[in-house]
Image (tube, helix red, strand yellow):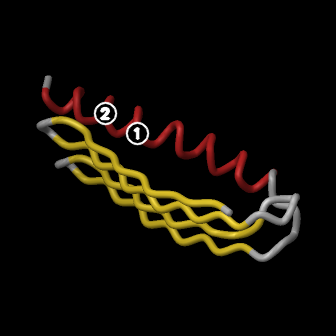
Amino acid sequence: MRSIAKYVAVGALVTPLVIGSAGFASADDGGPAYKKSQNSANVGGGTRSETVSGFTPDGKAYFLTSTKKAGPTGATGSCTGSHS
């Protein structure tokens, strides 16, 4: 039963990220951008970290870094961002 809960937690964590990544890619206006991400999953749970920066279509700069983790005892997430 615990294994099922782990898979559900990891699936709940990964699904929005996959959908969000597709939206991020389609919103690219060709301007300067930086993106780095790292994903991992094992029997103990899963983690995802991502850092992105660039410019919006109207020329404003942005930065976002986020970390999400799911494991046998629950899930956590943190996010820091800024824009000009």
Does the CB distance between marks 1 and 2 fall below 8 Å? yes
Q: Which residue is mark 2?
A: 9
Q: Which residue is mark 1?
A: 13
Which residue is pictured at 53% across the width and 45% down the height?
Answer: 17
Residue 80: image x %, image y %?
A: 44, 57
Query: Of residues 73 and 63, which is closer to you in this image?
Result: 63
Residue 31: image x %, image y %?
A: 84, 72
Name the kind of residue labelled 2 in the image. Answer: Ala
Residue 63: image x %, image y %?
A: 58, 65
Query: Of residues 84 and 9, which is closer to you in this image?
Result: 84
Query: Of residues 1 and 20, which is closer to you in this image?
Result: 20
Secondary element type, mark 2: helix
- Say few, some or many: other residues with alpha carbon within 10 Å of mark 2 (under 14 / 14 to 19 / 20 or more): some
Residue 66: image x %, image y %?
A: 43, 56
Name the kind of residue labelled 1 in the image. Answer: Leu
Which residue is pictured at 77% across the width and 63% down the height?
Answer: 60
Secondary element type, mark 1: helix
Which residue is pictured at 65% across the width and 63% down the height?
Answer: 62
Q: Quadrant of the C terminus?
A: bottom right
Q: Would residue 12 appear left or right of 55 to someone viewing this image?
A: left
Distance in Å between CA atoms under marks 1 and 2: 6 Å
Q: Quadrant of the N terminus?
A: top left
